[in-house]
Amino acid sequence: MEVPMDPLFLAWSYFRRRKFQRCADICTKVLEDSPYDQESDSSLLMSEATWSLKTRALTEMVYIDEVDVDQEGIAEMMLDENAIAQVTRPGTSLRLPGTSQGGGPTPAVRPVTQSGRPITGFVRPSTQSGRPGTMEQAIKTPRTAHTARPVTSSSGRFVRLGTASMLTNPDGPFINLSRLNLAKYAQKPSLSRTLFEYIFHHENDVKNALDLAALATEHAQFKDWWWKVQLGKCYYRLGLHREAEKQFRSALNHQEVVDTYLYLAKVYQRLDQPVTALNLFKQGLDHFPGEVTLLTGIARIHEEMNNMTSATEYYKDVLKQDNTHVEAIACIGSNHFYTDQSEIALRFYRRLLQMGVYNCQLYNNLGLCCFYAQQYDMTLSSFERALALVSSDEEQADVWYNLGHVAVGIGNLPLAYQCFKLALAFNNDHAEAYNNLAVLELRKGRIEQSKAFLQTAASLAPQMYEPHFNLAILTDKVGDLQSSYAAARKSEEAFPEHVDTQQILKTLKQHFAEL
Amino acid sequence: MPEVKSMFREVLPKQGQLSMEDVPTMVLCKPKLLPLKSVTLEKLEKMQQEAQELIRQQQQQPSPAQ
C-alpha cells in the first residue's frame, strides 16, 4: 500500500528545490480542496501556511533583486524637480559625463555609449543607456531598438512584467488585491511579509504594497527596520525620493544592514548626488569592512563619473575580497584593453572563461584581445565560437563589426567590407558599421556613397565624433566648405579635445576670413 | 649574403629642406568590446522573452470560452 506524501510538505520541498511552478500548482490544489474560510483552527493554520507558501513561490518566480533594478524613464529624467542648480559643478554630477577627469580615456580610443560615456565592461539594468543630456536626445534614443527607454519608469518593464504574470493564470490573479482587507493581514506578521513581497514583486502594485507596509509598520510600533526598508522601496518606486531617504535612514538607526546602505545610495544616485552616495558607501564600509557590494557601488559611481583610474582601483579592491567577481574582472579587462594593454586584458577575460562564463560577449572580447595581443591563432576561432553563441541580431551585428576590424587589421579590405555589410544586415542601426563602411567606400573612390553612409551614421549616433569628423574631411575635399564647417563643429561638440578637428576648424576659419 | 645587402643603400637627404604635410585622414570607429550582462539583466530579458512567447501563443489559439 502506498502512502501519499502530505501535499503541503511536498510543496515545501519543491519550493526549497526552486521548482516554483510545481510548488504553486500543489498549493492551488490544496487551497481548492480546503478553502480559506474554515472554522477549525488547525485547518485554518494549514490553509494559511499553504496560502503563504504559494505567494512566496509566485514571488520567487519573478523576483528581481531590487538593488539592481533601476530604470529611469524620459519623464523622470526631464521633469526632474530635484535638481537644485541648472549647471552643476564639475565632479558632483552623474549627468554630465565630464571630459576625462582623472585620466579617463578619450573617445579617440574608447567608444562611447548613447549618452556620451565610455562604454563599460559590464551592463546592469540601470547602465543600459545612461542618461541622455537633452530632451531631443532622450526622445531620439529609443529609435534604436535595443536601448529603448520607457516614457516613464512606471510604464516600463515593471508593468509589462506584472501583466505577464497575470497572463499565466487564465482564471485571473491569485489574490484579488482590491478585495483584500490589508488591515487584517498587517496584524499577522507571519503572513504580512510574504504578502507584501507578493504585491510588490509579483503584482507590481506599489500603492497597495505601500498601504500594507504603512499599516504593518504601525502595527510594529515603528520599531521594525524591515518594514521601514520596504516603505522606502515603495516610496522610491513612486518617485518620492526624499521620503524614501527618511525611511532608509530611520531603518539604519534601528539596524545596520548592507542592503539598506545600497538602497539609500540608489536614492542619492537618482537624486544625482554621487558625492553623497560615495560618502554613504564609505560609512557603510566602516561598519562592514571589505563588503563587496559596497566596494562595487563605489567603483560604479567612479566609472559613471568617467574616473576610470579610481574605478579600477576599487574594482581591484573588490577582487581582493572576492576573486570571482565577474563585474570587476570584466571592467578591469575592458579598461586594460582600451588603455592599449590587450595582453593583460586577455588574461582577465581568460580568467572569466576559466570561471565558466560561456557566452557570445566573452568570446567576442577574447577574439579582439587575442588579435590586438598578436595571438593570431586564437583570434578567428574565438570569433567563430562567438558567432555560434549569439542570441540576438544585435549581438550578431556587433560580432561581425569586430570581425571587420580584424579584416582591416590584416589588410583584407574586401572581407572587411563584407563584414561591415553583414553587421548592417543584422542591425540596421549600427552607426559604427556605417562609418567604417563609408571610409572603405571612399578608398574605392565612391564619394556620394561614402557621404550617404556618413550622414546616416551621424544621424544615428550624434554622440560619436567619427562620422562628423569624416564628413568634415570629405566635404572639405570636394570644396563644400560650409557643410565641412558645420560637421566639424558637431565633431568638436562630441569630442572637444580632438586635435585634428581643431586643425580643420582653424584652416576653415582662415578660408572664410580670406573670402 | 653580403652581395645582396650591398644592393640596397639607404638614402638620407643631407641637404635641402625636408617638408611633410599633415593630411587629415578619415578615422575608423574603434573595435567594440561587448559588455557582459549581469545575472539580473539576463533574468529580466529571459522573463520578458517568455512573456512575449506566451502572449504570442495565446493570441494564436484563442481560448474556447470566447
Image (spheres, rainbow, N blue to C red):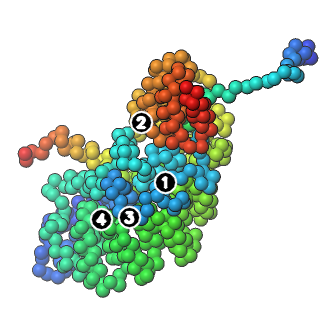
**Marks 4/2 same chain:** yes
For the residues labelled 3 and 4, say whether their Cβ atoms are less than 8 Å apart.
no
Q: Could you give the CA–CA distance between mark 3 and mark 4, rounded to whole angstroms? A: 14 Å
Task: Single out the mark in the foreground, 4 or 2.
Answer: 2
* Image quadrant where one finds the N terminus of chain A: bottom left
Residue at numbered disc 3: A82
Q: Is residue A4 visible?
A: no
Q: Could you give the CA–CA distance between mark 3 and mark 2, rounded to whole angstroms? A: 31 Å
Chain designation of label 1: A
Report helix, strand or loop for mark 3: loop
Q: Amino acid at mark 3?
A: Asn
**Of the image marks 3 and 1, the number of the one nearer the N terminus:** 3
Residue A181 location, quadrant = bottom left
Residue A108 location, quadrant = top right
Residue at numbered disc 1: A96
Q: Could you give the CA–CA distance between mark 4 and mark 2, rounded to whole angstroms? A: 33 Å
Mark 3 neighbour density, 10 Å: few (under 14) some (14–19) many (20 or more) = few
Residue at numbered disc 4: A238
**Of the image marks 2 and 1, the number of the one nearer the N terminus:** 1
Residue A48 located left or right of residue A300:
left
* Label annotation for residue A130: none
**Of the image marks 4 and 2, the number of the one nearer the N terminus:** 4
**Marks 3/2 same chain:** yes
Task: Single out the mark in the foreground, 3 or 2.
Answer: 3
Report helix, strand or loop for mark 2: helix
Task: Single out the mark in the foreground, 4 or 1.
Answer: 1
Q: Amino acid at mark 4?
A: Leu
**Observer-nearest of A122 and A95:** A95
Chain designation of label 3: A
**Of the image marks 4 and 1, the number of the one nearer the N terminus:** 1
